[in-house]
Image (spheres, helix red, strand yellow):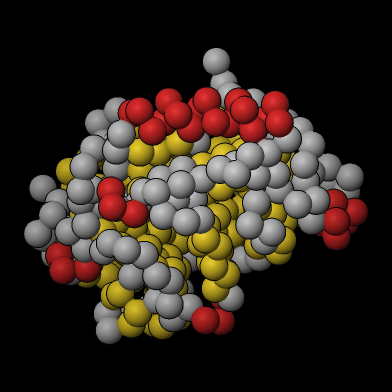
């Protein structure tokens, strides 16, 4: 069989009109390569005056990326980063020992309204990198490889595939790319693209060998096999994966670590940061220092 696991979406309402389809983690599959979290949000239309707002909150032990198909999100973090995330760009935030960030509707879109659609993923840092210094790197859309393959466009967000390499740096093997079908097409996904791979169907219709995927299904592909994928015209899919995790990961709220004790300490440190208006580990986000999200109980 070409498919190890077939993961359906589970819908979560995170407040107001913000509804996500959560794919990873899943009870039968906690991760694919370093990817330990995979959310698909939208498309959602916000009228003028309505907004998407995620208040300041912390992370440890991972890197995050929000990839947009439509719309814009203002990212601010405790490093002092303040920029608007736009479609096609990769904004790679490494939490390491600790970072705080917020995601809100930019002023222009707040006034005019917008249609918001994208993917948010978390990738676990290797054990030896879990406590690294936090970092944020912006990669404009035009800096990422875009090439045609069998009547489809491939945009390479991270890793290497079909002779192309992304400028995104990550300390373990990783693969992250989008596939947009211009016509009905067949694509072979070689086994050497990544040890662990999963195909997520954003929209449209697809077959993995003889298995049909519904929109918002994720098919975790069998390792070591070349897998054939047939995509209907205008379908959009994402392929993600990489090397298997070097140790099991524990997840608690926004904290990811190979060591449960580090998560316990991070929870305590976040409570202290809220009380004190920021700490060395979890500083305040410049320009967005109110409404910190408390620990869930």
**257 or 106: which is nearer to us?**
257
Q: Position of residue 82 (x, y in %)?
A: 72, 61
Q: Quadrant of residue 278?
A: top right
Foreground of the two, 96 or 62? 96
Residue at 28%, 62% in the rendered image: 172
- Reply above or below: 237 against 16: below
* Quadrant assignment for the C terminus: top right
* Position of 212 relative to 89 (above/below): above
Question: Residue at (26%, 59%) from the top-left corner?
Answer: 242
Q: Which of the 4 quarters of the picture holds residue 139? A: bottom right
Q: Residue at x 52, y 61 (%)?
A: 135
Residue at 39% of width from left, 49% of height from top? 131
Q: Can residue 208 be seen in the rendering of this structure?
A: no
Q: Is residue 143 left or right of residue 290?
A: left
Percent x, y for residue 146? 45, 80
Query: In the rendered image, is residue 148 in sight?
Result: yes
Quick check: 101 above or below 165?
Answer: above
User: How far across and how far down the image is residue 17, in percent?
Assistant: 71, 35
Report whether 168 appears left or right of 12.
left
């Amino acid at each position: 069989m070409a498919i190890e696991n077939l993961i359906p979406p589970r819908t979560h309402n995170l407040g107001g009109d913000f509804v996500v389809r959560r794919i990873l983690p899943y009870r039968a599959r906690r991760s694919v390569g370093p990817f330990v979290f995979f959310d698909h949000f939208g498309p959602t239309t916000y009228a003028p005056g309505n907004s998407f707002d995620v208040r300041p909150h912390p992370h440890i032990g991972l890197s995050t990326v929000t990839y947009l198909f439509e719309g814009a999100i203002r990212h601010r973090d405790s490093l002092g980063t303040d920029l608007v995330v736009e479609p096609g760009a990769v904004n790679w935030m490494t939490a390491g020992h600790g970072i705080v960030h917020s995601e809100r509707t930019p002023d222009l879109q707040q006034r005019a309204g917008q249609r918001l659609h994208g993917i948010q993923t978390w990738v676990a840092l290797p054990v030896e990198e879990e406590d690294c210094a936090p970092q944020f790197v912006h990669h404009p859309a035009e800096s990422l490889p875009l090439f045609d393959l069998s009547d489809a466009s491939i945009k390479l967000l991270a890793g290497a595939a079909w002779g192309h390499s992304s400028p995104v740096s990550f300390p373990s093997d990783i693969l992250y790319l989008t596939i947009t079908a211009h016509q009905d097409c067949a694509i072979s996904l070689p086994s050497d693209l990544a040890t662990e791979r999963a195909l997520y169907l954003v929209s449209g219709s697809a077959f993995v060998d003889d298995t049909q995927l519904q929109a918002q299904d994720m098919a975790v592909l069998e390792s070591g096999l070349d897998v054939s994928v047939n995509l209907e015209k205008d379908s959009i899919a994402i392929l993600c994966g990489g090397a298997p995790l070097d140790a099991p990961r524990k997840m608690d709220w926004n904290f990811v670590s190979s060591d449960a004790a580090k998560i316990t300490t991070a929870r305590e440190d976040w409570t202290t940061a809220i009380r004190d208006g920021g700490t060395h580990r979890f500083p305040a986000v410049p320009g967005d220092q109110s409404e910190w999200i408390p620990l869930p109980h």
